Image (tube, helix red, strand yellow):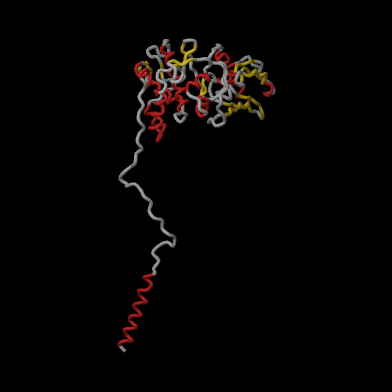
Amino acid sequence: MKQVVATALILLLLLFLLPLFFLDTGSTQATPEPQATLPLDRTVVSPSPTPVPAGPLDQERQIQVQLPDGTVRAMNMGDYLWCVVAAEMPASFELEALKAQAVAARTYAARKMDRATAAHPDANVCTDHTCCQAYITPEQAAANWGEQAPAYTVKVQTAVAGTDGVVAQYGGQLIDAVFFSSAAGRTVDAVEVWGNAVPYLTSVDSPEGEGVPNYHSTVTLTAREFKDKFLSAYPDAQLEGDPASWLGERTPNSAGGVGTLTVGGVTVGGGKLRALFGLRSANFTLSYAGDTFTFSVTGYGHGVGMSQYGANTLAQQGQTYDEILKWYYTGIDLTPAPAGDE
């Protein structure tokens, strides 16, 4: 009898404990192993690239800069050019394009130092891009660049230092190193924009293309809006009847854009139409349909001198900064000559 009771107790105990050995403790999916991670109390910081000081020629030359608050600050040319290049050209561009921009900016500033300007008589240059060149402080640039700030800071420094003291000349004189954002296949001869023929500012091919941001843009106006705006500048125009009849002969400029366009019997330059209607460039077509005038525009800027996006494309194709500058400014010399030039 005792053996039967003992056997029964053992069986009951086994029945009670057996499910515990097979109890499901989680998902039927295999749990991945933890990935290696850094300690939570430690952050990895990429080492900053080594700073590149301005070259000796730019360090020695001082320029007086009128800041936005009206004060005038003396800076060495290298520091000033950093602020200009960082403001005028995307730091993501190729280094050789940034170098070309640095030379253009240095040449422009050097010309300004040779003559007084009524807008800022106590300074050689100001920071207003409509008067001189665009300008941004390193702090503002870093905020715009975000995590790319360390690399872009050094990249712009390298562009300035790598062209130390180099300026563009024609016939022994500093050139007017004008530049703009993007062309529609060719640059424009200066005489067509400003009325003065300049031997180094002639029309040349420019290789930028569809990858340029906002390369194509449109401006639309109702017939009434178009009429009111045009008459405000050209009151003698005859804008009556069918609006489609207002548009007359179009003559192209050297880049294939609008040299002149006759509207309501008045012939107007493409540049003036660009300013009047707020167009991004004078390379446009104008059409009328459904009581709406539509400007279809390609490129951005006045179109004379160096195209910035074109310069970047040339750099991507392997052109050096001096080759880029000589592409856009016909017949110039660079002084001091870049290494490798005769």
Task: Say whether residue 24 is visible.
Answer: yes
Screen quadrant of the N terminus: bottom left
Instruction: Say which of 186 and 278 sits in front.
Output: 186
Left/right placement of residue 13 relative to residue 289 reads left
Left/right placement of residue 239 relative to residue 95 reads right
Instruction: Say which of 44 and 243 sits in front.
Output: 44
Q: Position of residue 10 (x, y in %)?
A: 33, 80
Residue 241 position by quadrant: top right
Farthest residue, direction bottom: 1
The residue shown at (35%, 77%) is: 14
Q: Position of residue 39 (x, y in %)?
A: 32, 47
The residue shown at (44%, 62%) is: 28
Compared to residue 71, the image places residue 317 above or below, namely below
Q: Position of residue 168 (x, y in %)?
A: 46, 16
Q: Position of residue 23 (x, y in %)?
A: 39, 68
Compared to residue 308, the image places residue 47 above or below, namely below
